[in-house]
Each structure stands twice: as C-alpha cells, then as structure tokens.
Amino acid sequence: MCDTDGDLTTRVAFALLEDVTWKGVVDVKCRNGVVKLAGLATSEQSRKAAEAIASQQSGVLAVVNKLDVSTCSKRPIPQRVP
C-alpha cells in the first residue's frame, strides 16, 4: 500500500502530539513524501526533536524544517494538557 500525502501528514502530526520531547506549535504539510514543518518550537532541542520524529515515520523521504525557536514570554506557546 502506498501512503498518500494526507496519510503522511496525519502520521507525522500525531507522532508529534504523542512525543514528550516536542514542544511547540507546528503546521505539517507533505508533498510526494517530503514533509515540511513550519511554526514555533520552544527550544532548539525541541526543533531538532520535531525533525527527528518526522523523519522516523514510515513513508517520509525527507523533512524540511522551517520551525522557528521562540522563547518570548509575550507570545507563549500552548502546552499539552495531560
């Protein structure tokens, strides 16, 4: 079975939601197996974690990481609610 871009987008988005190392707000898009991440990460470590999480998903051929790091207290990044 071939993954569609929609399948990959969903898989990456859910993987990010489930992973405790990723913190931030992300828009996930996929085209022909190439995943693009855009949005805000809370740290450089979290930014790199998002790329690693996305690249580990089945069917992902490449990841373009356009996440910015934001630690600005005036614009807080929503956190997951346990």
Image (tube, rainbow, N blue to C red):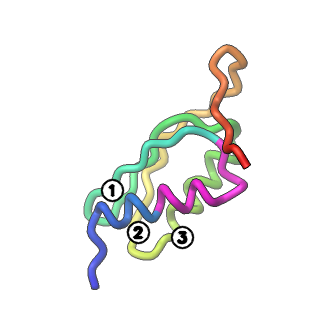
What residue did someone put label 3 on?
A: 56
For disc 1, the marked residue is 30
Residue behind mark 2: 60
The residue shown at (51%, 65%) is 55
Marks 1 and 2: in contact by CB < 8 Å?
yes
- Disc 3: CA contacts within 10 A as few (<14), some (14-19) or many (>=20): some
Q: In the image as oriented, which residue stretches furthest toward the bottom?
A: 1
The residue at 70%/38% (across/down) is 43
Mark 3: which secondary structure? loop
36 over 4 or under it: above or below:
above
Q: Is residue 10 above or below residue 78?
A: below
Q: Position of residue 63 (x, y in %)?
A: 44, 57
Rounded to the nearest whole Å, what is the CA distance between mark 3 and mark 2? 7 Å
The kind of residue tagged 3 is Gln
Looking at the image, which residue is at 38% across and 69% down? Answer: 61
Residue 50 place in picture, x, y as percent: 58, 53
Q: Which residues are magenta?
A: 12-23
Question: Please, what secondary structure does the residue beneath circle 1 have?
Answer: strand
Residue drawn at (71%, 55%), measured in percent from left and top? 20
Percent across and percent down for residue 76 are 66, 24
The number of numbered badges drawn on the structure is 3
Does residue 9 appear left or right of residue 14 in this picture?
left
Q: Earlier in the sequence, mark 2 or mark 1?
A: 1
